[in-house]
Image (spheres, helix red, strand yellow):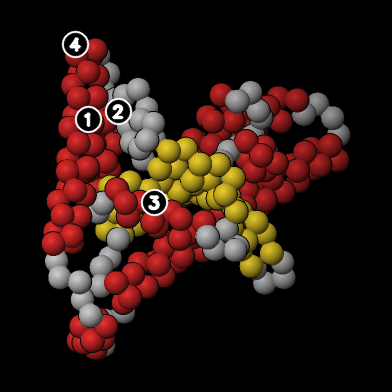
Amino acid sequence: MEQKEEGTIEEGTIFEAELQQEIMTILDTPEAVFHKTKNLMDMLVGYRELMMMYTCAIKEVRTKFEVLDTEFSVRFQRNPISSISTRLKHTNSIMQKLERNGCHFSIENIEKHVNDVAGIRVICSYIDDIYEIANSLLAQDDITLIRQKDYIVHPKPNGYRSLHLLVMVPVFFANYKRNMRVEVQIRTIAMDFWASLEHQLKYKQDIPNQQEIVAQLKSCAEVIASTDEEMLGIRQKIEAVSDTPTEDDILIEKLSRFDMHI
């Protein structure tokens, strides 16, 4: 996610299999060769345009989260979002996902069967920030929730925790509007730390005592979840014993931050 790898379009390789098939079946006239080649080039151009549209959808949703974080900073003197990262799915990953779903590579199948081409990951400090930010996003009238999976309330068997939202957002281009899907993952710093390490380790091959390592990772996930809950509880206790600010106190606090960088 911006952080991490932005997806790139490898023009010389993305249609390698399709191109080989076309070459093997070309036994006709030069006109047939031209027609097949033109169709392939049309698909390549269409793919590039689709990736552009997903990239713009990422920018739209990222901006929404940045606006929310800025608002919280000014109105409530705190930032619920620690960091935001984005990711455009690599072409090879798209092709593999379509193959697993029994679909051939096409623009139509990408839009229909691959929900996570555009991805955003939002990292929060506390668990309650996750739901507050998610609810604020979903309350916006141009955001449509397609699907929600709460792996915080219902963790995956390996211990993975995160809130996943699949949303639709309108993107306005020069001469038209297009509704685009974006997958949003919202998690705490601790959840993200665990998920990053687990992602690295699960791709290691020929690991001895693999079942033991899986059990240890799940145990670590439970410890991290407990720590998240405890940190939230500590913050709530501190807030509970703090003196309730008067309207004058709130006004003075806001004035003291009047010239801060937004």
| Amino acid marked by disc 4 | Asn
Would you say residue 189 is visible in this rendering?
Answer: yes
Q: CA gap, disc 3 to disc 2?
A: 19 Å
Q: CA distance from mark 2 to mark 1?
A: 7 Å
How far apart in space, not on screen, are marks 3 and 1 (Cα)?
20 Å
Residue linked to disc 1: 222
Label 3: which residue?
Answer: 131
Marks 1/4: CA distance?
A: 20 Å
Using the image, determine if residue 83 lies above or below residue 113. below
Question: Secondary structure beneath disc 1?
Answer: helix
* Three-letter amino acid code at the position of disc 3: Tyr
Tag 2 or tag 4, which sits nearer the N-term?
Answer: 2
**Could you tell me if the residues under marks 4 and 3 are in contact, i.e. CB atoms within 8 Å?**
no
Q: Residue at x 53, y 45 (%)?
A: 166
In the depicted view, which residue is nearer to us: 47 or 144?
A: 144
Residue 13 seen in the current view: no
State which mark lies toward you, 3 or 2: 3
Query: Marks 2 and 1: CB-CB under 8 Å?
Result: yes
Pointer 3 or 1: first along the chain: 3
Residue 208, percent from left and from top: 19, 11
**Up-down relation of residue 184 to residue 113 (above or below):** below
Q: Which residue is mark 2?
A: 159
